């Protein structure tokens, strides 16, 4: 056969290049220089965010028929109501406010080789709901309203790389869901494009190796959710990956690299994992539909916010934003403000020298396809005060009691600051014994990292919380302790 | 590593076993014996089907608020209305009746080796909408209402193999969509389970090799839609598959086997195909929601049926069924009766010795995820009399004008007789020149068979019409002309 057909070897070499970038702590800039650059961007940011009652949000109104919160353009996003029924669950039916956003946004990272090492163009960017101001964001994070300018503003830098991919090389490109508890069927296009062209680095942007981004991921509230989900979609897995790299450090590190390698074994074949996912989607009976916001029960609109009668879960609030470096210099919008800090944790264990993570097939009302694979534990402990005892998540107490010597990753990271106010979760990777939970029940399975990465080539499989943890696990490939 | 981890080699050996079964024209029974058995089942079937006005359907009623047609159990299926908007399409908005069915049914085939050759347990079964009576069906085709006995009746034979898969080996297990023009978000579990247990063959069932089923697939209206969709999900693809088999016959046959082999090249890498699918789902803006049946426009309920004012598309009718060999001996139900015979065709071509099929990313209002890959042409030619000229499908005229020497497959096959009345499509595989349509536009791509089979491990990618054509292409692996 001649050269006009492409062959599977291309994928393998991408995996090796990604791993090389993950091992590079210095690139076109040194890690210390990038830390200084980031600290200065954060220090000099001039964004101000003030709470505003929902009734007083400029350009937003409450639809008289439905009570929904709607932007005057009709685009952007809305706060509507959701009615959910999950047959057989501890809480079998409820209503709640939910964010709806029909259009698909772009979360794009531009990549380019410098001196043979892949770099990623990242942006230091503030969002109104961020806990600590500027965070490290993808090259582009834009709704269709942003880049088609529905709500006014200047052009989105670098967007053309992601709207017209033909002239460059696509490394990953997949629609992924976001928080199934707060969004109804929201999806963004997670896309990584590699270019050979000269790229002008604009103010607020910088080139990072993957290893450099990984170092910042260990810090609290630096690498934002959008960056984490895009990075999790990197094809960071290939046959022979473990063999191609020096395995230094302890056994955990070796087991991690073997877990990234397609030719390592796994407790369950990929076929049996797919069958298990099909089974969870056939077994769980979920009905979720949007309803008028005024029809949600047990939620109270007063004092310019919407809150649950228990004071738990989340509040819908309004903010007024004044920003220096954005497409639009000032605007108002609603935000969802969760009550309390969540815990998202993977239990991991070494099986015959290959690291496996315990995933949970979760039912959340916002998913398009019944279940998605989430962390072993994904919970805000405070919420369970209000819920029946049988709703308490499995493995939560074990995660909360983990001893420091078993904790492989631990950061307090924030969720999408464009929709959520001070939404933070503690992300943990906790190593357990090889014989832990060998038969963890019908909604849990032990997966290798290369199996997670294989599923991440497709929509509907891995939820946004587990995607962050996948990126966190990848970040440990470059460390020795 | 020890033996507790499974490795990728298992998948490869399944592909070889499947191909061996495809090449076997004789199994526990000879092909001629099975043809005789099938002809006798068809000849002696005693099912009668009589038209009944929709208003007179026993156990069905018209909901007074919505006009929807509903079964008294609340289960089974419904006829509701659908409102669809497809921005930028030739017909950008319309309403129509649609079948809704929330529960996931099981389409299951039981497999077992005899003398080292995989066999599949098939059923000779009638459905009320079948054109020619009994067809060859999967081991099990059952809605949840069937096997939980919502509408009465006896137990579904062999169902336990598919509800509890742990004791046997799962070969394929995936939720797949059905007709996006007639169903709203309908999905069935397509599942193939291999057993080593002794299996009692009940009356109306028989063991077939894959090659034997393939021979019957060439006959009009013998292998039913449910069998075809399940068979298309066989992992009929593996590295080295072409090398493992004698390549006999003409170049077309060799190109077909290479197309099944993972290690053959392809015009587009799998990554770029996934990116293209993501692009079609981001680009097309589709909104489809169920509405009350009484709110559909241009559809007229009179004379006991519901029809479009043009007399085109389809009619909703009622039937009374009296059957000898079913769980329920007699019942009434609505059926959707399409007007005219459709054409579903793949254009295929050899590129560097590897067969590629031209797939079309189709928008249909019943899909859960915007687009699915369909045949090159999927159309009922008569419908276009009523539609604007720009709605006429690309490649339709080319398919209708194909000369006999280019036609590799041609059968008139029926669609699901449990929901459709005399719904028949002509399924065609037409070979074109290697330089045909090199750049067929943003909604078409040339794919190899192993790429289609790879996508078929997942939901939401390949529509039911293209799945039948995939099974038809597989059926040509055992032929020499």
Image (cartoon, coloured by chain):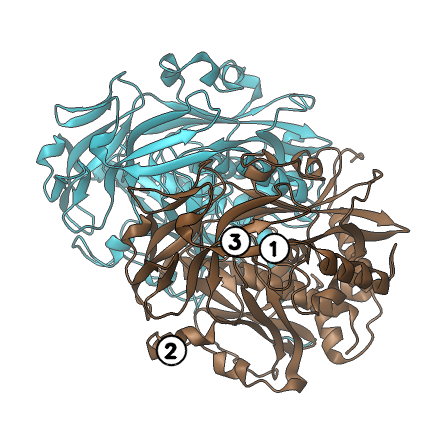
Chain colours: A brown, B cyan
**Quadrant for the N terminus of chain B in the image:** bottom right
- Asked if residue A278 lies left or right of residue B445, the reply is left
Kindly identify which residue carries mark 1. A48
The reply to whether residue B253 is visible in this rendering is no
Residue B353 position, x and y percent, is: 71, 33
Mark 1 Cα-neighbour bin, 10 Å: few <14, some 14–19, many ≥20? some
Which label was assigned to residue A385? 2
Does dot 2 land on a helix, a strand or a loop? helix
Q: Disc 3 and disc 2: Cα gap in Å?
A: 26 Å
Q: Disc 1 and disc 3: Cα gap in Å?
A: 16 Å
Subunit bearing disc 1: A
Subunit bearing disc 3: A
Residue A186 position, x and y percent, is: 49, 49
Which label was assigned to residue B362? none
Nearer the observer: mark 1 or 2; the answer is 1
- Quadrant of the image occupied by residue A353: bottom right
Q: Disc 1 and disc 2: Cα gap in Å?
A: 34 Å
Residue A214 position, x and y percent, is: 74, 64
Does dot 3 land on a helix, a strand or a loop? loop
Is disc 3 on the same chain as disc 1?
yes
Kindly identify which residue carries mark 3. A419
**N-term-proximal mark, 1 vs 3:** 1
Q: Nearer the viewer, residue A341 or B351?
A: A341
Instruction: Note whether A413 is above or below A2 in the view shown.
Output: below
Nearer the observer: mark 3 or 2; the answer is 3
């Amino acid at each position: 056969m001649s050269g006009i057909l492409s062959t599977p070897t291309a994928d393998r070499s991408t995996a090796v290049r990604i791993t090389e970038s993950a091992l590079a702590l210095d690139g076109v800039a040194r890690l210390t220089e990038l830390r200084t650059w980031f600290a200065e961007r954060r220090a000099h940011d001039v964004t101000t965010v003030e709470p505003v009652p929902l009734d007083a949000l400029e350009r937003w109104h409450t639809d008289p028929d439905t009570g929904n919160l709607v932007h005057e353009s009709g685009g952007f996003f809305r706060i509507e109501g959701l009615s959910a029924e999950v047959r057989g669950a501890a809480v079998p039916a409820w209503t709640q406010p939910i964010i709806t956003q029909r259009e698909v946004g772009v979360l794009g990272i531009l990549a380019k080789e410098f001196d043979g090492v892949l770099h990623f163009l990242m942006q230091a960017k503030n969002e109104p709901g961020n806990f600590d101001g500027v965070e490290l964001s993808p090259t582009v994070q834009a709704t269709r309203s942003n880049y088609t300018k529905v709500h006014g503003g200047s052009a989105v830098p670098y967007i053309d790389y992601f709207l017209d991919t033909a002239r460059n090389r696509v490394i990953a490109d997949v629609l992924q869901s976001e928080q199934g508890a707060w969004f109804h069927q929201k999806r963004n296009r997670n896309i990584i494009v590699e270019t050979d062209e000269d790229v002008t680095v604009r103010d607020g942007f910088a080139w990072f190796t993957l290893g450099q981004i990984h170092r910042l991921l260990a810090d609290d509230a630096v690498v934002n959710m959008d960056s984490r989900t895009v990075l999790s979609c990197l094809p960071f897995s290939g046959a022979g990956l473990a063999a191609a790299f020096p395995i230094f450090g302890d056994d955990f590190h070796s087991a991690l690299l073997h877990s990234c390698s397609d030719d390592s074994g796994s407790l369950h074949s990929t076929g049996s994992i797919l069958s298990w996912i099909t089974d969870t989607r056939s077994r769980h009976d979920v009905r979720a539909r949007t309803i008028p916001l005024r029809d949600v029960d047990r939620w109270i609109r007063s004092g310019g916010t919407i809150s649950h009668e228990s004071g738990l879960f989340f509040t819908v609030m309004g903010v007024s934003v004044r920003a220096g470096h954005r497409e639009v210099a000032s605007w108002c919008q609603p935000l969802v403000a969760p009550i309390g800090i969540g815990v998202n944790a993977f239990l991991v264990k070494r099986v015959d020298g290959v690291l496996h993570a315990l995933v949970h097939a979760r039912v959340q009302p916002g998913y398009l396809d019944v279940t998605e694979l989430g962390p072993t534990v994904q919970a805000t402990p405070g919420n369970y005060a209000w819920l029946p005892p049988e709703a308490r998540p499995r493995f939560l107490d074990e995660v909360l009691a983990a001893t420091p010597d078993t904790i492989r990753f631990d950061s307090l990271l924030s969720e999408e600051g464009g929709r959520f106010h001070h939404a933070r979760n503690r992300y943990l990777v906790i190593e357990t014994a090889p014989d832990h939970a060998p038969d963890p029940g019908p909604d849990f399975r032990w997966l290798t990292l290369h199996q997670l990465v294989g599923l991440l080539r497709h929509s509907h499989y891995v939820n946004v919380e587990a995607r962050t943890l996948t990126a966190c696990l990848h970040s440990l490939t470059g460390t020795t302790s």
